[in-house]
Image: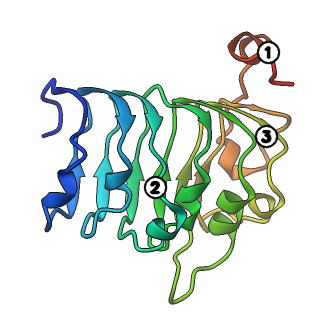
Amino acid sequence: MRNNKLNGNIPHDIDKVRFLQVLDLGHNMFSGTVPSVLFRHPSLEQLTLSYNEFSSLQAPAVDITLNSNLIALDLSYNKLRGLLPTFMASMPKLTALSLEHNEFTGMIPAQYAVKAAVAGNDNTSSFERLLLGGNYLFGPIPGPLLSLKPGSADVSLADNCLYRCPDAFFFCRGRDQKSAVDCKSFGPTIP
C-alpha cells in the first residue's frame, strides 16, 4: 500500500489482521497519531510509515512492548515531535530503527545508546541500525555510543543540535550539526 496517496488515520483495530508480518504504508498522506497497537501487534515484524505526516506516537504499556515482534521500524520523514520514545529500546527483537528527519528534541536516551553498543543475547537484540539524523536532538553523545567501532552498527546522528559530533565518529557521517540559530529558532530551550 506504499505510495498510494492514502490519507486519514490508521485504524486502531488493525491488530485483528492476525497474520500481518509486513506493513508498508510509506509515501502516503497519513496523519495524526501512530497507534500503539502497531507496536504490540502479535505478528508484525516490519513496519514502514516513512514519508507521511504523522505528528505523534501513542506509547504502549511498557510490559506490552516486551512481547513485540517488530524487527524493523521506519518512522522517518514525518512530523513527529517531542522526546525520543524510550519504549522502542525495550522492544526485544527490534534491530533497525529509523526516526530520521522528524522534529524530535531532547537528549538521546541512554537506553538507545546501550541497545546499540551492547551485544544482544537470547532474550533481546541490539540495534544494528539506529538512524536519528535530521532532528533537533541536543546534549552530549551518550558514552556507550562513543565506544562503537565502524561496522559494528549503522548509526547516524548528523544534522541535529548535538554539542559535538566530530568527524572522527563514523556516526556523524562527515556531516555538520544544525546551526545554533536553527536550533534556537526551533526550540528556545535548546542550549
Q: Position of residue 163 (x, y in %)?
A: 85, 34
Q: Is residue 124 visible?
A: yes
Query: Which dot, 2 or 3, sits closer to the camera?
Result: 2
Q: Position of residue 46 (x, y in %)?
A: 30, 59
Query: Which dot, 2 or 1, sits closer to the camera?
Result: 2
Give the residue type at disc 1: Pro
Q: Position of residue 147 (x, y in %)?
A: 79, 65
- 33 w.r.t. 189: above or below: below
- 110 w.r.t. 175: above or below: below
The circle drawn on residue 60 is 2
| Mark 2 vs 3, N-terminal side | 2
Q: Nearer the viewer, residue 159 or 92?
A: 92
The circle drawn on residue 78 is none
Residue denoted by label 1:
188
Q: Nearer the viewer, residue 52 or 3?
A: 52
- 113 w.r.t. 185: above or below: below
